[in-house]
Amino acid sequence: MSVDLLFCEGSTQSYDIRILRKLLQSFCQVIAGGSSRGLRKCIDHARQFYETKSVFAIRDRDFPKKWTGASQFVLEWITPDHQGQMKHWGWVWPRREIENYLIDPIIVQKSLEVCIRQKAFDVCPFDFEDYATVLNSVRDSIAVYQAARIALTQAGKPRYLCTSFGHARGQYNYRFPQQLDQSSCEHGIKILFQNHDQSLVTLEETLMEFHRIMNMECSRGKPRYQDYLYAFSGKDLLWAMEDWFTKTPFRSPTVFQETILTGIENADEDIALWCYEWNDLVNKIKTV
C-alpha cells in the first residue's frame, strides 16, 4: 500500500509544502494542514471522508524533551488517539524543522548549482567553504539560546507558552534576540513567565532546567551541540547569520531561503538523492 494523501505543517505557500510537492510529486498529493497540533484531526477527518484512502502526515521534530541523536531516517509517528487507541499518524522529520534542510551545506550547494546553471540568481561569488565555517560559528553563538528555547518548550506543555523571544525579524516577524548570552536568556525567560500560569511548572523550575540543558546538552561536545544541524532551530541558525548574509549576494536570510527553495523547485534531477531523509520518506510513502 502507498500513501494517497500526505498532510504537512504550514500554509499553502509554506516551505514545507513547496519542498514536499517537489519531492513527492509523482507519488502522492500533499496538503497543508496548518499547525502541528491539528494534524491528527486532519488525518482522522480525511480517513473517514475518503474511507479507502491512505492518509498520513509529516511534521517537524521540534525540540524533543529527550534528544536521541541524529538520524538519516524519518521517525515513525505513533501515538494514542483521543480514545487511547494507538495509531500510526505518519512520520516526523529527524531535524528540528524544515528550515534545517534549507541550510544543510550539501543541499545548499546542490540547490545553488541549479540556480547557477539556470542563471536564476547571481550566486557565483558564493564561497561554500566560508558558508560551512560561518554555520559552525553561529552554532556556538546560539547554543545558550537553544537551551533556553528547549526549556521553554518543556515548560509550555500542556499549557501554551511562547518558546522564543527577541526582536521581530524579516517579513514573517520571526523573533530572535540581539543578545544571546546566559544572562540575556534568563531575562527573556522571566519576561515570558510574567503572565504565565505557574501551577504546573514554575519559573524557578524552568531556569533550573535551562541551566541543566545548557551545560549537559547544548555546550561544546554535548549531544545537541554535536548534532546541531538536527537539534538546533534552522530559523535561529539563519538569523544568527544575518550580518554575514549582508556581505553576500543574498543580502538577507529571507532571500537566501527563497534562493535555495527556487533551486530545489527547479531541479531537473531527483532531489530525493540530495538527502538521506528525503529518500527515506519517499520509500516509506511508496511502501507504507
Image (cartoon, rainbow, N blue to C red):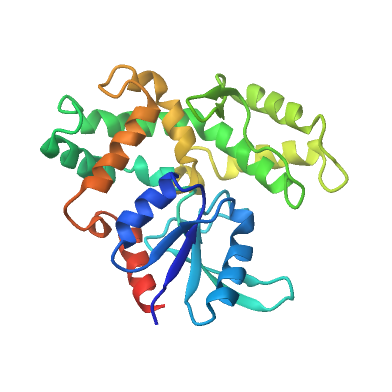
Q: Is residue 144 above or below residue 153?
A: above
Residue at x 51% of width, y 52% of height: 9
Quadrant position of residue 278: bottom left
Q: Is residue 232 above or below residue 180?
A: below
In the rendered image, the quadrant that contains the C terminus is: bottom left
Q: Position of residue 173 (x, y in %)?
A: 54, 27
User: 224 or 174: nearer the eye?
Assistant: 174
Q: Is residue 55 in view? A: yes
Q: Is residue 78 in view? A: no
Q: Is residue 163 above or below residue 78?
A: above
Q: Is residue 74 left or right of residue 276?
A: right
Quadrant position of residue 88: bottom right
Q: How many marks?
A: 0
In the rendered image, the quadrant that contains the N terminus is: bottom left
User: 29 or 227: nearer the eye?
Assistant: 29
Q: Position of residue 153 (x, y in %)?
A: 66, 45
Residue at x 55% of width, y 19% of height: 178
Q: Position of residue 84 (x, y in %)?
A: 73, 76
Q: Is residue 228 left or right of residue 264?
A: right
Q: Is residue 273 left or right of residue 43?
A: left
Q: Is residue 282 above or below residue 210?
A: below
User: 81 or 226: nearer the eye?
Assistant: 81
Residue at x 56% of width, y 37% of height: 146
Residue at x 64% of width, y 55% of height: 37
Q: Residue furthest right?
A: 199
Quadrant position of residue 119: top left
User: 6 or 239: nearer the eye?
Assistant: 6
Q: Position of residue 280 (x, y in %)?
A: 34, 66
Q: Residue furthest left?
A: 117
